[in-house]
Image (tube, rainbow, N blue to C red):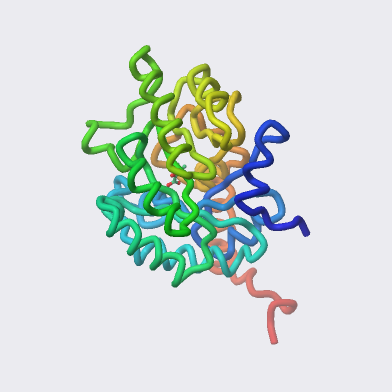
Amino acid sequence: MNKKMTINSIQKSKGERPLVMITAYDALFAKLFEESADMILVGDSLNMSFAGKKDTLSATIDQMIYHTNAVCSGAKNTFVVCDMPFGTYATKDEALKNAIKVFRETGADCVKIEGGSDKAGIVRHLTQNGVAVCGHIGLLPQSVRGEGGYKVKGKTESQKINLLKDAKAIEEAGAFCMVVEGVKAEVASEVAKSVKIPVIGIGAGNGVDGQVLVFSDMLGLFEEFTPKFVKKYIDGATLVKDALKQYANEVKTREFPQDIHTY
Ligand code: KIV
C-alpha cells in the first residue's frame, strides 16, 4: 500500500511528478480509487452528479460532512480534501467555524475554497488557525449564477494578469496547493510556474503540476453533459445499463437466481 500523502509530500512533488486527484463521494468508490489517487476530493460537484441538482450552489456543510465521512471511511490511507460549499466561508468567522466543524466531524486533511485575491484574507485566517487549505482559482463553479454561466478564463491579457495575481495571493495566504479550473492551457502553465505550491488543473491543459477529474465524468457515468476537458476512460453508463438490462431479463425469465446463488 502506498504511503498516505501529507501537505509536505504534496508540496515536494512539485517539479518531480504530476499529482493525481479524483473526486469521490462515498466509501465504495473512495476505496476503489485509493490505489491510484494521491488525493481524493469530496467536491461540491456531488450536488450535481450525486444529488441531481443543476449546479453546486445548494450543497450544505452537513452534506459535505456526511460524504467526507464516507470517503474517509473508505480511503483511510489517502489524503482527503473537503470542498467548502457556497456561502459557508463568506466571512473569516464563518469560514473558521465551518472548517473547524469539518475537521471535528470528519477525517478530512484539508478544506478547499473557491476564489483568488478576494478570498486571500479568508485563506490566511484559516491557515493561521491550523486549517490546511487548497485554493481554487479560474472558473469557479460556485460563481456560476453571479457570472451568468461557466466561463473559461485566461482568454484575455487582463484575465491572465488577474489569474497570476490570484495564484500569488492564495500562495502568500498560506494555501499548500491549489486547483486551477477552466483556464487556457498556456496561461495555466504560466500560473503553475509562477508559484512554489502545486497547481492541480481541471480543464487547464498539461502544463500544470497535477490533474483532477470528477469521477462520474471520467467513468462515463454522468450523462447530462460532457465538458471538452473530460476524457471518458470507460462508458460506465452503458456498462451499468446493460448489466441492469441483463439482470431484469434474467429475473423475468427466472434465469436468476440459480442454484449457486441459493441457500
Ligand atoms: O467540486 C468539485 O468536484 C471540484 C472539481 C471540479 C475541482 O471542485
Residue in front for this viewpoint, 10 or 43? 10
Going by the picture, which residue comes out furthest to the top? 157
- Residue at image location 64% in from the left, 62% down from the top: 31
Residue 182 appears left or right of 144: right
Going by the picture, which residue comes out furthest to the front? 128
Pick the quarter of the image with the N terminus. bottom right
Q: Is residue 106 above or below residue 24?
A: below
Q: Is residue 186 above or below residue 262?
A: above
- Residue at image location 56% in from the left, 69% down from the top: 251
Residue 1 appears left or right of 127: right
Q: Total label count?
A: 0
On the image, the x and y values in percent for residue 210 come to 61, 36
Q: Quadrant of ligand 1?
A: top left
- Residue at image location 37% in from the left, 64% down from the top: 63
- For residue 263, which quarter of the picture? bottom right
Residue in front for this viewpoint, 125 or 87? 125
Going by the picture, which residue comes out furthest to the bottom? 263
- Residue at image location 57% in from the left, 52% down from the top: 40
Residue in front for this viewpoint, 79 or 145? 79
Residue in front for this viewpoint, 263 or 143? 143
Q: Is residue 8 above or below residue 129?
A: above
On the image, the x and y values in percent for residue 238 come to 55, 45
- For residue 99, which quarter of the picture? bottom left
On the image, the x and y values in percent for residue 225 come to 40, 36
On the image, the x and y values in percent for residue 100 come to 40, 65
Going by the picture, which residue comes out furthest to the right? 1
